Amino acid sequence: MEKKKLLDLAEDPRFIPGIYNYCDRWCERCTMTSACLVYSTLEDASDDPAGLDLHNAEFWEDLQQIFQQTLELIKTCAAEKGIDLEAVETDAVIADAAALRNKAKNHELVQTARLYADRVDRWFSGQFPAGGFPASEDMASDGRSVDPILPGLDEHAQDAIEIIRWYQHQIMVKLVRGLSGNDEEASAENDWQRDADGSVKVALIGMDRSIMAWGTMLETLPDRAAGIHPILLGLEQLRRKTEQTFPCARSFTRPGFDISPLVS
Ligand code: SF4
């Protein structure tokens, strides 16, 4: 895009300053494309961003319905297995953390997030060994999702897989960013909010949505519950520990998203 056109766009009052700083970069599923300068510069931007926003808001609202139900299932499953959801994982993967390079990457939240991402990879390669399923890295590399067509899975399950794959690594990346931030650092948009809390809020939203998506997978594939339950429990522990470590993250106000009727 030419420089002048970009400068003109930047002054367009339709766009909310900094909205793209605390989003998940999933433009295809975003509820605020019509207010995003970055989206307007994409070559394949929709001709009707407002319509896309409405469609995407409905998509996330539908998924929300399964959230409480999945949380109840997690609690029951944890009680049955005697697992403390307030604790984080302490298995061998985490014990090897000394090899990691810096403080943020050594943090228990990041290690637990990495363990989650690895478990997801193992689960998918174990469940769908025939191949043809896209690697999670492919999902994020070009900013759009690959279409994973798996025989026998309905549209909801396909959506759930897309969601799980989208956030699988992003959760860890956002946690690293949050943990790497200066404690006093304010966000660019609001000097009373910490940038770290904004990054962690995006990680938490990724966890919420992943939990909902795993709930959908459980409904679709009840015979695979034994493999899904440990992943869900680990993710719920990570979510709780993240909220404890960053008590202000949930209340961080993301420009656009948290003041819009189309709240994501
Ligand atoms: S705010 Fe939405 S449209 Fe803009 S970059 Fe983020 S995900 Fe994409």
Image (cartoon, grey):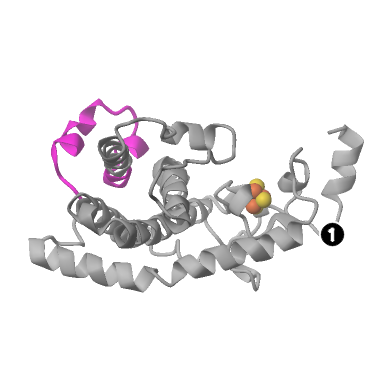
Q: Residues within 10 Å of mark 1 (few under 14, many from 20)?
A: few
Residue 52: x %, y % from top left: 69, 58
Residue 39 higher or lower than 262, as above or below: above
Q: Type of residue at label 1?
A: Pro
The reply to whether the residue tagged 1 has its Cβ within 8 angstroms of ligand 1 is no
Tell me which residue sits at (47%, 53%) in the image.
Answer: 159
Does residue 175 appear to the left or right of 35 in the view shown? left
Q: Quadrant of the N terminus?
A: top right
Residue 261 higher or lower than 204, as above or below: below
Residue 263: x %, y % from top left: 59, 68
Instruction: Pick whichever, 105 or 52, lies toward us.
Output: 52
- For disc 1, the marked residue is 13
Tell me which residue sits at (32%, 27%) in the image.
Answer: 101
In reply to whether residue 29 is colored magenta, the answer given is: no
Q: Quadrant of the C terminus?
A: bottom right
Which residues, given as a range, are shown in magenta? Answer: 88-113
Tell me which residue sits at (25%, 37%) in the image.
Answer: 126
